[in-house]
Amino acid sequence: MFAVTATRIDTDDPLAGLTLGEHPDPSPPDGWEVVTVKAASLNHHDVWTLRGVGISADRLPIVLGCDAAGIDGAGREVVVHTVIGDPAAGGGDETLDPARSLLSERYDGTFAERVMVPSRNLLPKPAALSFDEAACLPTAYLTAYKMLFGRSGLEPGSTVLVQGAGGGVATALILLGRAGGYRVWATSRSEAKREQALELGAERAFPAGSRLPERVDAVMETVGEATWAHSLRALRPGGRIVTCGATSGPTPPAELNRVFFLQLSVVGSTMGTRDQLDRLLRFCEQTGARPRIDRTLPLTQAADGFAAMISGDLFGKVVFTV
Ligand SMILES: NC(=O)c1ccc[n+]([C@@H]2O[C@H](COP(=O)([O-])OP(=O)(O)OC[C@H]3O[C@@H](n4cnc5c(N)ncnc54)[C@H](OP(=O)(O)O)[C@@H]3O)[C@@H](O)[C@H]2O)c1
């Protein structure tokens, strides 16, 4: 089958290890199913893999891609939950299973004509969502959903700052946060992206690092080093940073004096459970919220999507159709 694989790791030039071509068809063990992929979406995770973050060279070649929507063996339209883990091993939450992985880490991912997954990882695709829209949800949108409605500790009406407005997770945070009743503020380095953030539902949009008119209840962080100091300063006493990523680097100064004196919380968040993905699908159905798609490309042109993500030239998700 045709697939997009990581064939070698290159920290500085991730595209050097991106290979398009033939790959063996999946042969599913008992309890797994093969899905014919209709649409898949790109995440920064795929770039990290090519850079060798979170994977070792002995796992290559591996098919990239965490997210997909497609057709299962019985002809049903499905969305793929990408977290491969045992809820029992994580106290009822597969994201806390110490042995959990995402598709494309241990098992081949979704940038292919077919992908195999455990049967429990298939959810019915709501008719209201297209394959392209559904393929955006399992990583970026599920992560944003759990950050906003699980890990933030907030109630609707609270003010949330989203750093780095243009990213896949960041656009999801703006969209879902607004639909869930938060007052959403966003930052971006780019004026064009700030305007797009307002169109997406942010109430205000600010240049990266600028002083805010008032302090916020929580900051949603995916950027890391470049925005961390601003995130700490943006919070009201007792406020909370929810972090799921560190695109610009993972080790900013901790500024512990600010953390303890203002009694701030720093909370990590990763992905979400199958049940949360199920609720996210229903949330989209009920609120009318739909993923923001920057561009849709045939899988054969995947390299163009990767290049756009590496250059930061995106507002929303890149979808690959198969
Ligand atoms: N833990 C999890 O479960 C999980 C799940 C999904 C993603 N993540 C992580 O979250 C991060 C975002 O993922 P994504 O797929 O949304 O990536 P993405 O689409 O590539 O996000 C890029 C955004 O980050 C901002 N940014 C990048 N470098 C910056 C810099 N030097 N200074 C300021 N802003 C910068 C940019 O905002 P502006 O251009 O608007 O300023 C850009 O729009 C990644 O690190 C990813 O690995 C983690």
Image: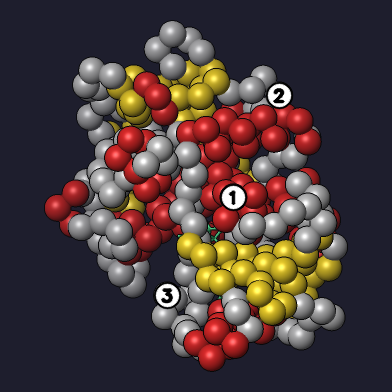
Label 2, secondary structure: give it: loop
In the image, residue 202 lies at what x, y percent? 80, 60
Identify the residue at the far left of this view.
58
Q: Is residue 279 visible?
A: yes
Between the C-alphas of marks 3 and 1, the distance is 23 Å
User: Going 59% across and 50% down the picture, which residue do you hit?
Assistant: 150
Label 2 beta carbon less than 8 Å to ligand 1: no
Q: Kindly identify which residue carries mark 1.
A: 150
Q: Amino acid at mark 2?
A: Ala
Q: Amino acid at mark 1?
A: Gly
Which residue is nearer to you in this view: 91 or 85? 91
> Nearer the viewer's eye, disc 2 or disc 1?
1
Q: Kindly identify which residue carries mark 3.
A: 250
* Figure quadrant of residue 189: bottom right
Q: Earlier in the sequence, mark 2 or mark 1?
A: 2
In the image, residue 313 lies at what x, y percent? 60, 64
Relative side of 225 to 183, left or right: left
Contact check, label 2 and label 1, Cβ < 8 Å: no
How busy is the neighbourhood of tag 2: few (under 14 within 10 Å), some, or many (20 plus)? Answer: some
Q: Earlier in the sequence, mark 3 or mark 1?
A: 1
How busy is the neighbourhood of tag 3: few (under 14 within 10 Å), some, or many (20 plus)? Answer: few
Identify the residue at the far top of this view.
74
Q: Kindly identify which residue carries mark 2.
A: 128
In the image, residue 194 lies at what x, y percent? 77, 68
In the image, residue 58 lies at what x, y percent? 14, 53
Between the C-alphas of marks 2 and 1, the distance is 25 Å
Between the C-alphas of marks 2 and 3, the distance is 38 Å
Q: Is residue 58 above or below residue 240?
A: above
